[in-house]
Image (spheres, helix red, strand yellow):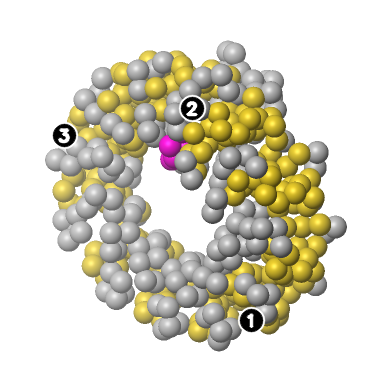
Amino acid sequence: MNYTIRHFSSALLLTGGILCSQNLWACERPVVYGYDYIDCLSDGLANVERDDKKGFIDKTGKVVIQPLYDWTYPFSEGLTGVSRNGKWGFIDNTGKVVIPLKYDMAYNFSEGLASVERNGKWGFIDNTGKVVIPLNYDETGPFSEGLASVERNGKAGFIDNTGKVVIPLKYDMADSFSEGLARVQQNDKWGFVDNTGKVVVPLKYDSADFFNEGLARVRQNGKWGFIDNTGKVVIPLKYDSADFFNEGLATVMQNDKWGFIDNTGKVVIPLKYDYAGSFSEGLASVERNGKAGFIDKTGQVVIPLSYDWAGSFNEGLASVERNGKRGFIDKTGKVVVPLKYDEAYDFSEGLAKVMQNDKYGFVDNTGKVVVPLKYDMAEYFYNGIAAVLDRSTGEVFYINRQGERLYWLGGRRFD
């Protein structure tokens, strides 16, 4: 059977016959009935769909804007982009059309301006519909920290909210500003510029990530290290692999051995493990000679390396595996949920998704089965609801913590 999904706010991935997601459900949704699809609340309103038409309800379920449109965005800065019959415009939170539906494409407002497209050219309008920046660019990004990336003839740069070119269009790629810097690429090399266009970090890296905990991970000639926001190399590019900093430490690998460094580059935990995961709730999983356990931030083994696999701690519990079966342990190493499941995922809101014989359900932190293992897919709980798939009917829908069905997700059966 060929499974397809339409009209999701974020696309589910179909991998090897099992549906999985990318943390899609982390938002608040009204719990009401009678719609094919209900999106996250944004600015107090949630996008809903019925019979292929979209509108908005408030958090109580009251209809604020009737389902009339072919497509809508979540509300942003008091307005949302809507489309009907192939044309885009903007409405306010009462449903009033503020900007006529006359554009071929439009994106939501950011810092008072929205990018719009007509006849293949992009520009910006204000919240009255006035064209502030003429539609003469091939691509535009959203405004962030007063600047927006724009592209023309294959070259990218930045403009301010008057349309003035602040940073010349000379880069092959340009990302949005964050913390005063923007990533740019030229001739396959990455660096960072400030909001005047000054190159703060030279364009010499094969890869450069966004800043996290004050540092950015960079790669050159196959080696990874970290720079600060002045471009100074804080941690030399000498590692074969390096992860992001988490709880003050980052996992690094050299010569196939993993360990941990702090944000000065000091090796806090020696590179002696065959694998190491990131720290979570003060502990990190490590593996050596095919066995996994947990260490603390001093490198002390807190839970012996006696498992075939170990995940990370979340809500005080971590999934572990032995002899092909998974369950959960607490931070003392005590088995709280017996190792009898084929798969066991992180806890969320006191419940964890587990799988046995290709069927998914949920257990609580004592191991009690709260939602029977009868679904072909299940997602994490957020705000008391989780998405599940019943392949026998081809339906994706939400359930509550008692396993009761709430409403369809996606507005379509699988066919």
* Residues packed near mark 3 inside 10 Å, few (<14), some (14 to 19) or many (20 plus): few
Q: Residue at x 81, y 57 (%)?
A: 118
Q: Residue at x 62, y 72 (%)?
A: 161
Q: Which residue is mark 3?
A: 334
Of helix, strand and loop, which mostly describes the magenta segment? Answer: loop
* Residues packed near mark 2 inside 10 Å, few (<14), some (14 to 19) or many (20 plus): some
The residues colored magenta run 25-29
Residue placed most toward the observer, 185 or 140 = 140
Q: Is residue 255 visible?
A: no
Q: Which residue is mark 1?
A: 167
Please, is residue 76 above or below residue 58 in the view? Answer: below
Which mark lies nearer to you, 3 or 2?
Answer: 2
Which mark lies nearer to you, 1 or 3?
Answer: 1
Q: Is residue 407 visible?
A: yes
Which mark is first along the chain, 2 or 3?
Answer: 2
Give the SS element for disc 2: loop
Q: In this view, which residue lies farthest toward the right?
A: 119
Which mark is first along the chain, 2 or 1?
Answer: 2
Amino acid type, residue under disc 3 in the picture: Lys
Q: Residue at x 47, y 41 (%)?
A: 44
Give the percent coordinates (x, y) of residue 79. Answer: 59, 49
Q: Is residue 404 magenta?
A: no
Give the SS element for disc 1: strand
Q: Which residue is mark 2?
A: 61
Amino acid type, residue under disc 2 in the picture: Gly
Asked if residue 259 lies left or right of residue 359, the reply is left
Give the percent coordinates (x, y) of residue 332. Answer: 14, 40
